[in-house]
Every structure is written in C-alpha cells, then in structure tokens.
Amino acid sequence: MKQIGFKNFRRFANHLTIDFGNINLLVGGNNSGKSTLVKALLLITENLRMLIDDSDHFINAREGEEKKAGYHPEFNFAPNILHDALHIGTFERAINNASDSNEMLLSIVYGNIYKVSITIIPNDSPELPTAPIKEIVIEDLRTELTISLNYVEQVAEIHLTRDLNNFDELIMLFRHTNIKIMDYKELLESPSSIEKFDKILERLNEDKTRKLQQNELDQPGFFRAVVREDYEMLERRILQAKEEFIFASKLDFSNGIVIREQFDKIRMPLPFLNSSFMRIGRYYREFDMSDDDEQRTSLDEIHNYLYSKRDYFRRLNMTLVRCIQEPNTEYLYAHAVNQNTLYRINSQNDYMSNTIQEYFCSNIKKSDEEYKFIQKWMKVFNIASDFVVSPVAGCEAYTVKIGTIGTSQKNWMNLAEKGMGSIQMMILLFKIATLIRKYKGIGGARRGFMPVILIEEPEQNLHPSLQSELAKLFFEINDKYNIRFIVETHSEYLIRRAQVLVGDMECKTQEETDERNPFKVFYFPENGVPYDMGMAPTGKFLRNFDEGFFDVAAKLNMEVIRRERKK
C-alpha cells in the first residue's frame, strides 16, 4: 500500500491523498484526523477483500425485497464484520456532514502498480451498516489503462490512452529462463517494431539451432529439457506480442479509446464483477455491428486488439487480487491490553488473548531468531530478560511469565504484575515476532507484500526515555524484515529519536535522504489538510509544526527560567 485517498469522509470534505513511507508517524492535536486516516485505510482494504471474495455482504437483496437484476455490491461500515476498532457503523456517520455532495470516495494505491477507487452513495435505509457502491475505478499505473465499473448503470468502460504492449513483460520472461538476456538486450529496448520482433525470433532460432548442433539440448538431464522448453515458450510469447503490436498499430490512441459495454454482454474477465457476469475462457464479445462501414471497421480493429490482449486482462485480475489479498494489516489500538493473569480464548475481540495464542501456535522455539528478538527488546524496554507462554486446559487459555535468564521459572512473575506500558510492549513484540515467522523467506518482488502494522499511541504508559526507543524498534524491524508501520502518536520523544536516526545515516544530499529515509512524519493541523514534514540530511524538519505543538515544554521551561531570574 503506497497511498490512501478519501473525499467527503469524516472531517475531510475535500479530496486528500497521503503517500506512505515505510515508517509513518501521524502527529497532531486531538480530533485532527489521524484516526480518520486509519479508519479509511482499514475500511477500504477490508471491503476490497470482501469484494474479491464475492461475499454475501455485498449482494443487494434483503429480506422482504425483490432482488435487483444485475450485480449491486455494497460497502460495509459495520465494526462487528470488519474490525472492532472502526466504530463507524453507518454511511451517515462516515460522510462529512458539511459537504453538499452525498457521495463518498475512498482510494488506495498498491505498490505503484494499481490504484483502486470506490464511490459510495447513501442507502435508502440510513440505519443499515451497508451502503451501495456506485462505481469502482481500477487504474493500471504502468500502462495508463482505466477500467470503470458503474454499478448503477450496470456498465463497464475501458479507457485506453496508449498501446498496452511493451518490452517489460518480455524482459521479465527472459529473466525467468535459462537463456542469456544480455544476448538480446539491444532488441528489448523500446520502442517496439515488427523488425525487432522478427530479429528476436531469428536470434532465438539461431541460438537454439546452434545448441542442437552441439548436442547441448539433446543430452539427458532435467536442465537441458528446461532450456528446450524456454526457447519454445519465448517463441510463442514473442509471436503473440508481435500480433498484439500489429493490431495496436491500426488504432489511433492520440485522443484515447473508450470501450463501453453492459455488464451482461462482457466476455472479458474484469475485476469486481460477480462471476455470473464473466465468461472465463472467452475473453471478448461480438461487438454490435454498425450500419456505418467505417465505424464497423473501427469496432473490428478494437475487437481484434482486445482479443489479442486477453492474457493481459487475465494477469491484471490475478495480480490485483494478490495485491488486495496478500498485504496483512494488523491494528493495535490503545487500551488493547489488560492486567489479567489468565488470557482466555473466548472472544474474537480480545486482541491481547488472540495475539498470545497466535504466538504460541507459531511454534517459536528458544533457539529461533524470533524468540531472541523478543528477548532483546524486552531488555531494552526494562521488562525482563526472558519469558514463557504456557497453555492452560488444552489451549483454552494461556499464561505469560517473565523473569531473568538462567533462573528458575518458579520464581518468575506473571506479566500482569508489570505495569500497563510493559504489558502493551510485550503484546506488540509477540505480534511482530509472529509476523516475522509467518512472512520469513519472502523476498524479491514479493517484499512489497509484507504486512503493515497500525498502532495507536504505543507510547502510552511508557517512560519518556523508553518512548524514544520505539523509533529504534520500528527502524530495526523495517530495515531487517521490511514490515511497515503507521503509528498515531503524541510522543515528542519518539519523533525526536526518528530525527536523530535519520541524521545518523549521514546522507550527503537531500536526494539521498529522500531515498534512504524510512520515516515520514505527517502533521495533522487543527484546521487544514495534513502534510509531510520532510527531513533534511541532518534530520531537521523541512516544515514547521503549528504553534502549540511540540513547543509547549520549551515554553514552560522558559517561563520557569524567567521566574528564577526574577528572584
């Protein structure tokens, strides 16, 4: 998730977008909109997951009503279905009351690849937790393709501004084969042309013939069989790309091309359409033939082009579904902990007990890095040096004890005997360790699908010096495991430590700082829109906080000094 946007949601009537970094610190006064951003993020991610699953929550057919023809998804604001921390409930509570518009917009960007926007309209029954979705818009940010699904009119529009074909996919295919891409590098550079495709095919054939003559492909062995298949696969895909290029060359993209079609006539698999309206295996429809010969010819050309891009739309579906389903969003809200000595698994809303159970079921042993990770940060936060989680009554409940390494566990104390700050930190460490174990081994392109942890005021009940250690904790976890954070905080100590960590990088230029700095501090003013504070190579903020924020302590200290001088 790279960006969140919303309009006419809660206190924000005008359109607002926030571009996330790896560690995002949300600061500002009470009721300034920090929680609004978190709620928007949770709402859109959970609703998109339910849409992908084609959940019954989205079918607009209620008891006593005649089911409407077509597919009418709904947006769910119910905290009992989504997350107990949302506390929104209905469309009426979520929409900005001062706005003249009755439409709400939420949008999200996944990995600089896809942007998905949802427009929601009021429900006829305002007390219900759902509201109709008017439109979903999917944008492929790489190809500039836009798909608009209007559920009121039951119409889909595909907007093309340029040819969807490029060499990027072919380059990726080469890299996943045993064929040296360097031998074809100059031919895989844009722009595309028929001559380039022919030369690639010719070179592939020459290369394969040479290896056949030298018996490099005929000798037994799994590797050589794979090489033979690599050549055949690349030849097929390059022939297909050439065909796509020929069809595209007959179209004029200069003013854009719009294909508009009713849902029940679509034969291409498009995202967020009920499966009953898609014909998987048939990727195009017979366009209605016009009496105008010129227009009929144009439709035929578009028809051929879209059919040639059937694999593109199939991949778009698969990739977008993965983007929506894979990122795991964890929310740790304030007051999510208690001082119970026995953590019972009897409620889905008991975050603390569920977190302890998830950790225990992860089967993390003392020799594992996740266990040592918890031990390390327990010491940093002055909790203890070791711990043990024990099941009770067949895992119906759990106890957590802490103590000193090398001492008898009989003398250890229950975690509940520590302060609320220590308990909250232990739950955070359990959750992070569980996520590290769950996502261990993910690398390469999939590192962008690592989880995001949203935390509300983690500094609660912590000593100021320990509050500053939170920045170091987030920094290490993001750097080592690529887990990202969105943190609501009022802690000046956490913010100042983040500045120091950026300064410790000793970046030479602002460009280098912007590239390497994992922290983004967003300030939410009482009136106005949030903004990124930005950081210089030294860690100094590039913008200022409003008066009364992070300068109160300094002003009070100056007042004490003035009074002292008057004596």
Image (cartoon, rainbow, N blue to C red):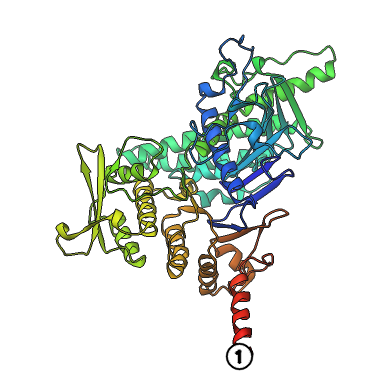
Q: Quadrant of residue 386?
A: bottom left
Q: Which residue is mark 1?
A: 567
Amino acid type assigned to the residue bearing label 1 in the image: Lys
Quadrant occupied by the C terminus: bottom right
* Mark 1 closeness class: few <14, some 14–19, many ≥20 residues within 10 Å: few
Q: Nearer the viewer, residue 223 or 135?
A: 135
Q: Is residue 522 left or right of residue 333?
A: right
Q: Nearer the viewer, residue 17 or 403?
A: 403
Residue 84 position, x and y percent, is 48, 38
Q: Is residue 29 left or right of residue 343?
A: right
Please, is residue 132 above or below residue 444 in the view? above
Q: Quadrant of residue 507?
A: bottom right
Please, is residue 73 above or below residue 13 in the view? above
Residue 288 position, x and y percent, is 74, 13
Query: Which residue is depicted at the point 41% across and 40% down?
Result: 227
Q: Is residue 50 left or right of residue 253?
A: left
* Residue 425 appearing in the image: yes
Residue 397 position, x and y percent, is 26, 40
